[in-house]
Image (tube, helix red, strand yellow):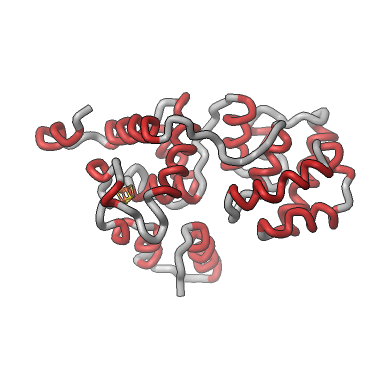
Amino acid sequence: MNIKANTKARKPSTKQRALEILRRIKELYPDATCSLDYETPVQLLIATILSAQCTDERVNKVTPELFRQFPDAAAIAAAELDDIVTLVKSTGFFRNKAKNIQAACRLIMTEFGGEVPQTMEALLTLPGVARKTANVVLANAFGIHMGVTVDTHVKRLSYRLGLTKHLDPVRVEQDLIKLLPRPDWENWSIRLIYHGRAVCNARKPACDRCILADLCPSAFNAAAHSPAKKLSTTNVKGTASKKLLKSVALENDIQVT
Ligand code: SF4
């Protein structure tokens, strides 16, 4: 599709832009895959829980020893919690993560016969599992597309690309589901994560070398269309709202005073 030529005649719809962005990022990152290392569904579940507020690179440094000592749900369920805590310490929020990993594995053993469940509903009953983790596990371990994985990169880029007006991951996901074909939901997330790391950085997007620039309302003006700008123009009142602002800022690698 020649979007530039079409733009002069008629502005492409949001859906047309989303599909063209999808086509281009598939071409740009043909071999993109989930960057977490794992051999089984339960290992992917654990790695994804550990990846919250942490890089996949860091998680991949921690999991070989964790999975060597505790290779499956039964082993994690029976482990001393302190041993898990020690092994996952460098991923941040390690006490909560270790507790959630063990509680999730215990539930997998008692309620799901030792296997990671294959439905969104069942996955969401596991401690430490929200829609993002469930989507990653369903798509990559089982090839089931129940939603779009929205991590910090997917949220930031979808927002900058004008495909959503929201910052809440669940609402971003609902917007993306309407724009993208179901078989490409996970494709979208994996490739947008690659693009977020390589080009559309949170602080310094490299619009001058971005193949999406002609489709992007934030091109060369990302600061004006950033989550930080939205946050700073929002009238934030109350402790709960301030907490939300801080957590969104943290996820987007933004300093808020
Ligand atoms: S044009 Fe700039 S802001 Fe838009 S996606 Fe590319 S790098 Fe990000």
Query: Residue 201, percent across and down?
Result: 40, 54
Residue 247 visible here: yes
In the image, residue 199 above or below residue 8: below
In this rendering, would 43 be left or right of 230? Answer: right
**Where does residue 18 sit, x and y in percent of width and height?**
33, 35
Residue 185 visible from this viewpoint: no
Q: Which quadrant of the rendered structure holds the N terminus?
A: top left
61 or 171, which lies in front?
A: 61
Image point (71%, 30%), residue name:
117
Q: Nearer the viewer, residue 55 or 218?
A: 55
Q: Residue at x 32, y 61 (%)?
A: 223
The residue nearer to you, when weighing 104 against 125, is: 104
Q: Is residue 25 above or below residue 94?
A: above
Determine whether, in the image, residue 98 is placed left or right of residue 197: right
Compared with residue 237, is residue 149 higher up or lower down, i.e. above or below? above
Q: Residue at x 80, y 46 (%)?
A: 102
Residue positioned 43% across, 68% down in the render: 236
